Image (spheres, rainbow, N blue to C red):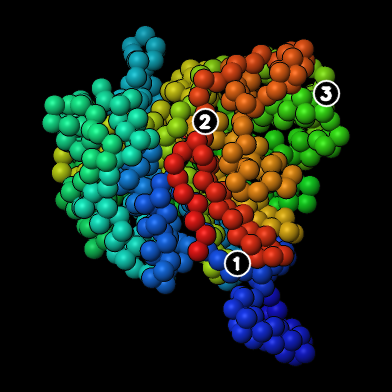
Amino acid sequence: MIGRHAPRAARLFSAAVWLIFAIVGWAPPAAYADGVAHAAAHKAAIASAYPLASQAGQEVLAAGGNAFDAAVAVSAALAVVEPSSSGLGGGGFYLLQRQSDGYETMLDAREKAPGAASRDMYLDKAGKPVEDASISGSLASAIPGEPAAFEYLARKFGKLSLKRNLEPAIRLAREGFPLYARLQTAIRYKRGILLRWPDTAKIFLTADGGVPDLGTVIKQPDLANTLEIIADQGAKGFYEGRVASDLVAGVRAGGGIWTLRDLAAYRVIERKPLIGRYHGARIVSASPPSSGGVALLDALNILSGFDLHRFDSATRKHLVIEAMRRAYRDRAIYLGDPDFVKMPLAQLMSPDYAAGQRSSIRTDKAMPSDLLPGIESAPAGMHTTHFSILDAAGNRVAATISVNLFFGTGYMPPKTGVLLNNTMDDFSTKPGVPNEFGLVGAAANSIEPNKRSLSSMTPSFVETPKGLMIIGTPGGSYITSMVLLGTLDYLDGMSADQIVRSPRYHHQYLPDVVDYESDALTDGEIAELKAMGHRLRVSGRKWGNMQVITWDFATGKVDSASDPRGDGEGLVY
Ligand code: DON
């Protein structure tokens, strides 16, 4: 953008361009932090995991809101209609870019450990992990971050009031929505846990504890009340006062350790996103306490030294797998909450470091993970949720939010309507002991009071001189490798629809095995990868629920696609 100090002729030219754009209804070019300039979108798009949530965002955009208002509306609606994946009792990461000045930031709304948490809280006297202690019951819940993000997004970045942004979600909670197949499957899968908690069972199960029929209207009056209190009072309505007292009383009655102080002290933190380059593309991604951006950029740095198109498809996949192996290893060893641990981020993301990692990769042979010095590790399900938003002005949001496993702990403290997360399981409960996603960690991700657990969530923007992609997905430890594959697909010219459909493969250092969707590798590739020494494990199911928006700067075309593995909706307005 031409600023105040530009010569007069340039300013006049700029003013004329603005005028022309205003007349033809096309917004003016914006200059970004790194000098890349391009036109603003002429269409808005939302891709989320369920149509009612995308529509909530659309409603707020139509009411004059921007992408950030829509992010509040979509998150809150997802808390109601996809309660198995995210909600007020969870947290996540919101990657934002504001069009007017190119300001980029990551809202860290990650849950944090209660003040009374301690390193060995999930170990017995003999130092052995107590089974399920970090995933079930009130002790497994960290202090939620999502409600704080709602207020922060609306107040600092939005155009509408928090109250207006929460209206669609409050309506959905109060009036209900028809049960759909994927949520019914999640309820069936977790019925045992939901049955344990009367307030949860009342909402999601029939009176005799059965799984409700498709189309049954699910109403959540307590959740509607809690959302209304937040709409009226802001984050305080959740973190202080009646709701906070009910949350703490409920958690403590269940053996948990939350205090009113823990809730009152919760703050969203703005962190600088991680920025890297790959063959001319600018990648913006989540910074710690997510490991996503570090691992994504590290893997891309490793791959940037190869001309992947020169290789046959099996070798190309082999190289991507070897890059994943190395990036996930570093995750396990070095990463944690930046407010608690010093991390060698500059080193991990430097091209020189990647060159060192690359030099240990042979193009014809797998390297066993054991040969990479490190630590000790089972795979992921489809909980958590991601949405991508681009508004007509060019503001963008990539948000991945979660309660960790399906329905979190399943526990809903009475009168709150809030399902509590089990994100404490994302800590390393003991060095080398794998968590629910088979991820191992070290001291950097050990439990400490008020610390945020390390995440794999990887909301990202990928920008080239030609266009932009907004991407993310759920999938536990598979998230980062899915975003890596999506990035490579986008840079290979695939459309949003092709990217979300694309079959996936994954390596996370430990266990030392390549997991793959049944259609991700051909018989020939399987034979070649085995011959190189890879252990392969076909997955019986599909992974991820990727939500992608693409924007072609030259034509202004905006596309939005939701993963066919889920039943979300990508809308372009
Ligand atoms: O933050 C994380 O990495 C996990 N809590 C995400 C969990 C997830 O994606 C579950 N979905 N399969």
Q: Which one is earlier in the sequence, the residue at label 3 or at label 2?
A: 3
Residue occupying image coordinates x 39% and y 11%: 128
Q: Determine whether label 1 and label 2 are within 8 Å by CB.
A: no
- In the rendered image, residue 436, in percent from the top left (x then y), is placed at 44, 23
Ligand 1 within 8 A of label 2's CB?
A: yes
How far apart, in angstroms, are the residues tagged by discs 3 and 2? Answer: 27 Å
Task: State the image quarter where residue 409 is shown.
Answer: top left
How far apart, in angstroms, are the residues tagged by discs 3 and 1? Answer: 41 Å
Q: Name the residue under label 2.
A: 543
Residue nearest the viewer, comparing 484 with 344: 484
Q: What residue type is labelled 3?
A: Thr
- In the rendered image, residue 2, in percent from the top left (x then y), is placed at 70, 79
Q: What residue type is labelled 2?
A: Trp
Q: Residue 363 carries which label?
A: 3
Q: Name the residue under label 1.
A: 41
Residue 513, compared with residue 45, is above or below; it is above
Residue occupying image coordinates x 51% and y 20%: 540
Label 2: element kind? loop
Ligand 1 within 8 A of label 1's CB?
A: no
Q: Which one is earlier in the sequence, the residue at label 1 or at label 2?
A: 1
> Is 473 left, or right, of 232 in this rendering?
right
Q: What residue type is labelled 1?
A: Ala
Residue 255, compared with residue 297, is above or below; it is above
Label 1: element kind? loop
How many numbered marks, from 0 up? 3
- In the rendered image, residue 504, in percent from the top left (x then y), is placed at 61, 31
